[in-house]
Amino acid sequence: MSDTLGYEPRVRPTGEVAAEIAALSSSVLDIVHVQGRITEGAPMELPWDEGDDPARYCNITHLWSLYGVDDTVLEAGMTALADRLPENGWTVAKNGPDSSRSRNHQILAVHMATRAQLEATKRKGINGREPLILFSVYSRFFIPVQEPL
């Protein structure tokens, strides 16, 4: 077991993990059930940046935002997310205000089958900023293996 991570990373094909995270992100959007605008972008591989061998471990992270709708619609989406995550295989670890001065609504959850994690933070539309929900869906660290062609 890795003392730094607290678990033993598995050897996994990067493409498999990326597809898993993309599917989980898509399901999160379905759960939120808000028809707004979504930032573009695909899951990306990020290396572990600590220790003697930073290339040994990596994770897959998908960062995206939902915006273009009223603040109350986004809050309803956050409520739906918190309510429906458990029936979709997630355990909600936090559902409440974050530590920022704005006390934004934040949901932290773990997908039990994959151990992937979700961070969703609804930023209020204050001071002329557009309200939005920031999402981060990411895998556990793993040891990447090349996939056969």
Image (tube, helix red, strand yellow):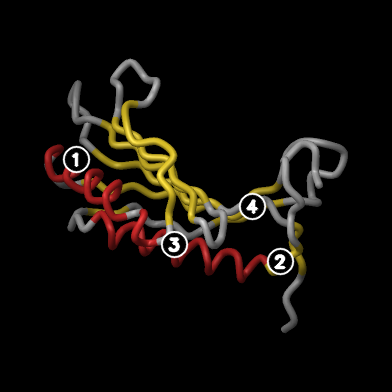
- Residue extending farthest top: 101
Q: Position of residue 53 (x, y in %)?
A: 85, 44
Residue underneath mark 3? 24
Q: Position of residue 20 (x, y in %)?
A: 53, 66
Spatial distance from mark 3 to mark 4, Cα to Cα? Answer: 14 Å
Which circle's residue, 1 or 4, is located before the other in the chain? 4
Spatial distance from mark 3 to mark 2, Cα to Cα? Answer: 17 Å
Q: Is residue 38 above or below residue 18?
A: above
Label 4 crowd bin: few (<14), some (14–19), many (20+), radius 10 Å: many
Left or right of 57, for residue 64? left
Spatial distance from mark 1 to mark 4, Cα to Cα? Answer: 29 Å
What residue is shown at x 30% (from left), y 28% (from top)? Answer: 104
Which circle's residue, 1 or 2, is located before the other in the chain? 2
Comparing labels 3 and 4, the label whose residue is closer to the camera: 3
Amino acid type at image mark 2: Arg
Q: Nearer the viewer, residue 94 or 26?
A: 94
Spatial distance from mark 1 to mark 2, Cα to Cα? Answer: 36 Å
Which circle's residue, 3 or 1, is located before the other in the chain? 3
Left or right of 24, for residue 76? left
